[in-house]
Amino acid sequence: MPPVIPKILFADQAPDKNTECLQIMKQHVVEENIFTCSDPDEIPAILTKHGINILFLDLSLYQKDNIKGLDSIQREFPELPIIAAIPEKANQLEQQILEREVFFYVTTPYQNSDIQLAVRRGLAKVGASITNAVTETRERLPAFYGIIGETAVMQNLFNLISKVSEDDFATVLIRGESGTGKELVAKAIHRHSSRKNNNFVPVNCAAIPDDLLESELFGYTKGAFTGATQNKIGRIEYADGGTLFLDEIGDMKPTLQAKLLRVLQEREFEPIGGLKATPVDTRIVAATHCDLEQLVEEGTFREDLYYRLSVIPIHIPPLKDRKADIPILLDAFLEMHATKRGREKFTLSVDAMAALLTYNWKGNVRELENLVQQMAILCSGKEIHLDDLPERLLADFNPGAIDYELVNKILLLSETSPAEATETSNDIPSRRTTLPSQNEWDKGQVDFKELINDYESQLIIKAMRLTEGNKKEAAKLLNLKRTTLLEKIKKKNLQGMWEEN
């Protein structure tokens, strides 16, 4: 199925003369998906023929029957987001379109900031709905022994793991950046093999001091050194019949590399202080994020051990090379961490999802899961928006230049789709947007009016901050009448609360 790219119809008295409006739209949507029209009678046909996703409608096209024209479009296309353009200070018309729950409105003459905001909000809405419509029909592929991925590179990885697991003896060298899930792959190899009923023993060679790593791996006999009061079984022996996973093998010191090489060659080992070798049936799976070939050239890693370890090499792709898996991973992590904390699963706005899809993810899947865990703890709303994301994720992100074509291409390859953004804020300690705790429910301490009042106040404060205290712009952002916003600010005593300290 080809990617769905948002389409806009700009219906205006003189669309070709409003070049600045068109230029703003072209920042977000490919030019061939922007349609123009100056005849109101042609609008329904264009909407149907081209599958328009957003209608930018100048109500003056209908002259005196502007509201009737709007009503006609809404009846025929009830799901279509309409951005209505009305003359400035047309208070009666403003009230009428608010009563009809028009998605968004701007005033004429057009202001670039209004058009930018309207287009962004419109694309955020249809981006979510388009993705939902496409992905609802897809069934997610099951996780492969806890490894999540539906992209071609991950499916190839799963096939390779299945083939590798059929051989119980050949050593495997797993390579990949930190956080890609090397131990998960090692566990999958073990669990998919005939050794699955025996021990899987992980050892992080970088986390254990050199003077302790040898005894951890090989064990020792009583009296082998001061303090050795009894025999100790090493992890190599403990993995007999199973799998020994040596993570960060590149950090192992050369003298220990020689002893490991003998284990691989002779299938036996000698504990520290032992006088004879002990046979062992242990499959060794190693992993590293280092360039072992470079370490061999530098003389810090044995060449013969390198070739012994890399009988079957496996490369795990970094997250930046399989971004279509990001929404799927997000969904799984959101479900897991929301359930763990007894809270409702939250979603991400299209803008927030776009930021995550364009981020480099140097920490890979581990960094993504850590982000979700952080959001589950710190964010109280049901939707995560750009303001909720850490600054490091937004350092190189330009919200005004979202590549919606790329975003939709990625989202169409995944099941998870972002929900429509709701402007919320989590930086106002005195305001609450979390759902009541189970304890509050049990004690009958849930105050519906108070919760709604707090949430409404937070929305107003957020809108006022975004517009730097401009009440007219804040009212537009909230789709409220300006007088209504003023009344709420006064009634709730919110004056000045949006000002940064």
Image (cartoon, rainbow, N blue to C red):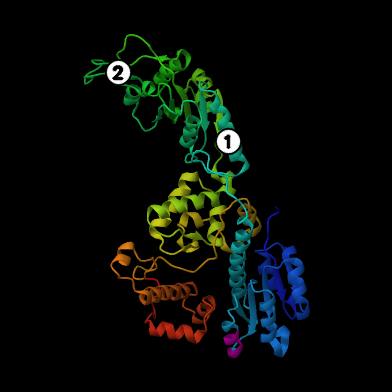
The kind of secondary structure element at disc 2 is strand
Report the Cα–Cα distance between label 2 and label 1: 38 Å
The answer to whether marks 2 and 1 mark residues whose Cβ atoms lie closer than 8 Å is no
Label 1 crowd (10 A; few <14 / some 14-19 / many >=20): some
State the image quarter where residue 351 is shown.
Answer: bottom right
Q: Is residue 103 left or right of residue 7?
A: left
Give residue 157's mark: 1
Label 2 crowd (10 A; few <14 / some 14-19 / many >=20): many
Magenta stretch: dominant secondary structure: helix
Q: Is residue 285 magenta?
A: no
Residue under the image location 32 percent in, 25 percent down: 212
Instruction: Out of 306 and 145, give the one closest to the viewer.
Output: 145
Residue tagged 2: 220
Q: Is residue 227 left or right of residue 310?
A: left
Q: Is residue 160 visible?
A: yes
State the image quarter where residue 164 is shown.
Answer: top right
Q: Position of residue 249 (x, y in %)?
A: 45, 28
Position above or below: 56 against 205: below
In the image, the segment drawn in magenta is 91-96
The kind of secondary structure element at disc 1 is helix
Instruction: Out of 361 and 412, give the one closest to the viewer.
Output: 412
Residue under the image location 46 percent in, 29 percent down: 196
Amino acid beneath label 1:
Leu
Amino acid beneath label 2:
Tyr
Instruction: Out of 85 and 447, give the one closest to the viewer.
Output: 447
